[in-house]
Image: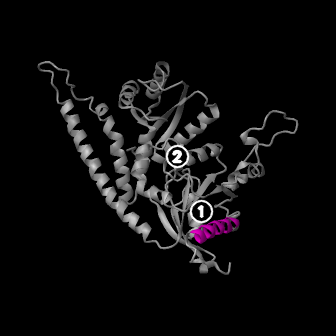
Amino acid sequence: MIETGKRKERAILVGLIYPGQDEDQSRDYLAELSFLTETAGAEPVFSFVQRLKAPDPKTFVGSGRISEIASYVSENGIDLAIFDDELSAAQIRNIENVLKCRVLDRTNLILDIFAGRANTSYARTQVELAQYQYLLPRLTGMWTHLERQRGGIGLRGPGETEIETDRRIIRDKIALLKDRLKKIDVQMSTQRRNRGKMVRVALVGYTNVGKSTIMNLISKTDLPAENRLFATLDATVRKVVIGNLPFLLSDTVGFIRKLPHHLVESFKSTLDEVRESDLLLHVIDISHPGFEEQIEVVDATLNDLGSAGKPVILVFNKIDSFTYTKKDEDDLTPAERGNFSLDDLKNTWMAADKNHRSIFISAKTRENIDEFRKLLYEEVKRIHITRYPYNDFLFGNE
C-alpha cells in the first residue's frame, strides 16, 4: 500500500511510446497515470518516456534510460517509480536493484486505489481476491533476501521451502475468497430476480466522467461524486420514477485503459448489473481530449463482458467544461480534433449514429437535463412495452 501519512511519497512515472502512437497520446497516458498516482496518495514529480517497439524484458526501458532514471532517483529523493504497464516479477526485481527505490506497475497501483476505496465487505473481498491473484506469480521476486537452492552439499537454503509454503497459503486464500464470492453472487442474483417487473438501466463509462453525478441527479440520491478516479466501487441500485414510469438505475465501477483482468474477474457480481441490464447509459466526458479513445476502451470492456449488443444511449457529459481552438479562416491545414466546436461534434457520427441515440448535457450545471429525462423515458417505455406488454397501464395517459 502507498503510505499516505505525514509526507506524501515522491514518485516518478515511466512510460513507453509504442509504434503508431503519437506524442499527444503519450502525454494523455502519462497524465492519466499521474492522476492515478495522486488518487493513490503519492506526489508525481517527473515523467520519463522512451520510444521502443516493445518493453525491454529485463528493465522495461533501455539500459541508457534506466541509468538516467537511477541518477534522477538518487539526486531527488524519490520514493517510488511507477510504470505505465504490467511488470513481471523479474522486471520488478531488476529495476529495484538499479533504482534502489520501490517499484510499482500500473496494475498494482490500480489495485492499491481499489483497496483504499473498498468500503463494504463485499468490495473488500473482491479487491483482496484480485490482489492475491496478482501476487501469486510474483512471489519469487519477493524472496530474494533468502538463499536459493543451488544444489550441492551445504548449499540448501530455506528459500524455496518458504516460497512454496507462501504459495500454498495464497492458493488456499484465493480458493476461500472465490468460495465466499460465489455465495455472495447467489445472494445478489436472487436480489436481482426479486426486483419485480421493472426495466433495468445501468450507467457505464470511463472512470471520472460523471456517472455518480448523473445518478444523484436522476434518482435524487446522495452518492459520493468527486473529481477522482474510482470514487464508486460498489454497484448502487435505486428505483427511479420519471412521469409515472418506474425503473431501476444502477451506478457501476468505472472502466479504465489497461484495466487489470484480475479486477474484471473479481468484480463479476458488480459487473453483472451491467450484464443483466436492459439499457446502458454510456456516459462520456466530452471535455477530455481523448474521449474517443475512452469510448473505444468502454466498448471493448462491454464486449468482453458480453454486453455489446444492448441498447445504448450515449450521454456526452461536461459540455460546460468543453473547449476548442478555432481555426483561422486562411489556415488551409486539415482540422484537428482540438479545432472542432461542440456543434461540429453534435453533427458528426456521434449524434447521427443510427444504433445509438445521443444527448449532450452538463450534470453539473443541469444543462439539457430535461431533454435527457425525456429521452430516457422514451427508451425505458419502449423496452417496458416490449418486455411487459400487459403492464402498460402505468403510462396509458402519456
Give 356 or 371, whichever is nearer the viewer. Answer: 356
For residue 136, what is the image quadrant?
Answer: top left
Main secondary structure type of the part rendered in magenta: helix
Judge whether residue 95 can be spotted in this image: yes
89 relative position to 45: left or right: left
Q: Compared with residue 26, is residue 339 higher up or lower down, i.e. above or below?
A: below
Three-letter amino acid code of the residue under disc 2: Ile
Q: Position of residue 224 (x, y in %)?
A: 51, 61
Q: Amino acid at mark 1?
A: Ile
Quadrant where the C terminus lies? bottom right
Q: SS of the residue at dot 1?
A: helix
- Residue 315 horizontal/vertical position (percent): 64, 57
- In the image, residue 218 sits, relative to residue 32, either above or below, namely below
Q: Residue at x 49, y 35 (%)?
A: 84
Q: Give yes or no for residue 375 being in the magenta stretch.
A: yes
Q: Residues within 10 Å of mark 2 (few under 14, many from 20)?
A: some
Q: Quadrant of the N terminus?
A: top left
Q: Residue at x 40, y 64 (%)?
A: 189
Q: Residues within 10 Å of mark 1 (few under 14, many from 20)?
A: many
- Sequence-earlier tag: 2 or 1: 1
**Which residue is denoted by mark 2 in the rendering?**
256
Q: Please give left or right for residue 232 compared with residue 89 in the image.
A: right
Residue visible at 31% across and 31% down in the picture = 141
Circle 1 residue: 214
Q: Look at the image and give the residue range highlighted in magenta.
A: 371-386
Q: Where residue 394 sits in the image (x, y, percent)?
A: 60, 79
Q: CA distance from mark 2 to mark 1?
A: 19 Å
Question: As drawn, which residue projects farthest toward the right?
Answer: 330
Marks 2,1: beta carbons within 8 A = no
Position above or below: 209 against 21: below
Q: Is residue 93 part of the magenta span, yes or no?
A: no
Q: Decide: is 37 above or below 146.
A: below
